[in-house]
Image: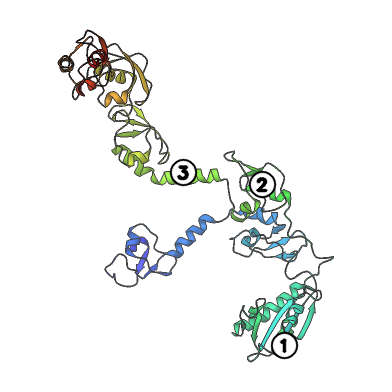
Amino acid sequence: MRAADLEPLEPYAGRRDKAWRCLCNGCGRETSPSLGGILAGQGGCRHCADVRAAAGRKTDPDIAVAAMRAAGLEPLEPYATSVTAWRCRCAACGNEVSPTLMKIRAGGGCKFCATHGIDLAGPSKVYVISHQEWKAVKIGIGACTGYTSRLIQHERQGWQLHQAREYTTGAAAYDVEQAVLGRLRQAGLIPFLTSDVMPNGWTETCSAARVTAAEVWAMVDEETRSAEEPYAPRVGGRPCAAVLIDAEAAAAEMRACGYEPLVPYPGRTNATWPSRCTTCGHEGRPTFNAVRNAGQRCRVCRAKETQAKRAATNAPKAQETIRTAGLEPLEAYPGSQTPWRCRCTTCGRETSPTYSNVNSGSKDCRFCALNSATDERASAEVRAAGFEPLEPYPGRTTDRWRCRCSCGNEVMTRLSSVRSGTTGCKKCPRSGSRTDPVAAAAEARAAGFEPLEPYPGKTTDRWRCRCRCSTAITLTLTSIRGGRTACGTCSRGATR
């Protein structure tokens, strides 16, 4: 445990799979890994592992800046992390905002230029309302007028207005509301209602038995007096479109991520954008959202990098395995499924097995294992079996090979058949379980037939013989063994 930078806080329990309380010397946090996990190579401290993983996933600062500028925001300080508030200035309205990179990648932008939710740059109001039936008090903000006003929506649900105050900007109203909610939350007064009772705004409700509407409004007055300088209201109407993406800024962000756009920006972040990878040249169709939200790069390059990392990790073991099998690598380890150029230490020939085949038990090269052969070796093997090659070796043991049998017959055989024991063509006399030609001739004579040619070699082959009636016929040894003792002429004469 100490070798893994962990200091035990309790004695060893005697089991490798039991959690062992330790103190991480790296971050000072308490953790409970098992000894078995440490011996297996696992990291002991989960927090340190998360920190290392986060450092590996951290977005490149240049890509982060490009993402902010693509959303119309100019950073005012260096990039920290994707979840850290980042001070920026909106290029459209000039206000200073502090969004996170994660929110920008999710489609956010300047809160003053947003087209949904509270209009932070337009007039707004803070209101306190109460509900007699639910015995609840609520604080909220919303538009001053209009059918979509939150205050009008709450009044339809039975809420009654206690008091309201208008502000020149929604940002000022939002600051006051958040300050009051912070005080109520610190006192443990919110929330009171649940989302089932009040789906919209239940987190800003408190019990009327614990705090009255007048007390909440007093907090509003106090926070309004202590508020900072008011925000400058927007000149003109609210934007009618969501945060627009500048085409040039979007193209710059694509180039920062390794893509060269082939067509202009399609206008939507979720639309496919034909682009070419500047590293490998592969043409793909990523969406701007995928590139911006996750820093997605070319899938071909990602696959190659993953394969290269895996190969680098497995290379020492692979080289040891391949040398144990009697092969000397001639190039770097390419991966488990890619042919690997090697030289056989037994026969000296160059071969290209895959690591997966060698690792699964194939210990010889293809020449030593007789799975392949040179032209000289293959020709020598077929000559030993009684064949003379009439053309060069076709290259594979299962390919048909034109040869001449020792009996003079031209045949098409295979090296694999020769290696399986074939020693002649089908017309040649056979050995072993085949009938001996002398015995076959004796059987024919015993049945009343005189052979006119040598036995063809198979019991089903046609055999020219002469019957006792001097008629020349063709028959098979199978028919003789089946009881045939006369030709057709003899049979007809006997019938008459």
Q: Residue furthest front?
A: 496
Q: CA distance from mark 3 to mark 2?
A: 28 Å
Q: Residues within 10 Å of mark 3 (few under 14, many from 20)?
A: some
Disc 3 from disc 1: Cα separation: 66 Å
Mark whose residue sits in front, 1 or 2 = 2
User: Percent from the top left, x then y, of residue 156?
Assistant: 74, 81
**3 and 2 marks in contact (CB < 8 Å):** no
Horizontal and vertical percent for residue 495? 24, 17
Please say if 97 is above or below 139: above
Give the residue type at disc 1.
Ala
The mark that comes first in sequence, 3 or 1, is 1
Residue 297 location in percent, x, y?
58, 48
Instruction: Determine the secondary structure under disc 2.
Output: loop
**How is colour applied across the structure in the image?**
rainbow
In front: 360, or 465? Answer: 465
Q: In the rendered view, does 246 fall on the left or right side of 417? A: right
Q: How many dots with numbers?
A: 3
Kindly identify the residue that appears in the image at 26 percent across and 21 percent down: 460
Residue 342 on image: x %, y %: 36, 32
- Label 3 SS: helix
Picture quarter with the C terminus: top left
Residue 285 visible in the picture:
yes
Mark 3–mark 1 contact, CB under 8 Å? Answer: no
Q: Does any portion of residue 26 appear in the rendered image? A: no
Circle 3: residue type: Ala
Q: Quadrant of residue 258?
A: top right
Question: Which amino acid lies under the numbered mark 2 shown in the image of this protein?
Answer: Trp
In this rendering, would 447 be left or right of 131? left
Q: Name above or below for residue 269 compared with residue 352.
A: below
Residue 308: assigned label: 3
Per the image, the residue denoted by label 2 is 273
Residue at mark 1: 218
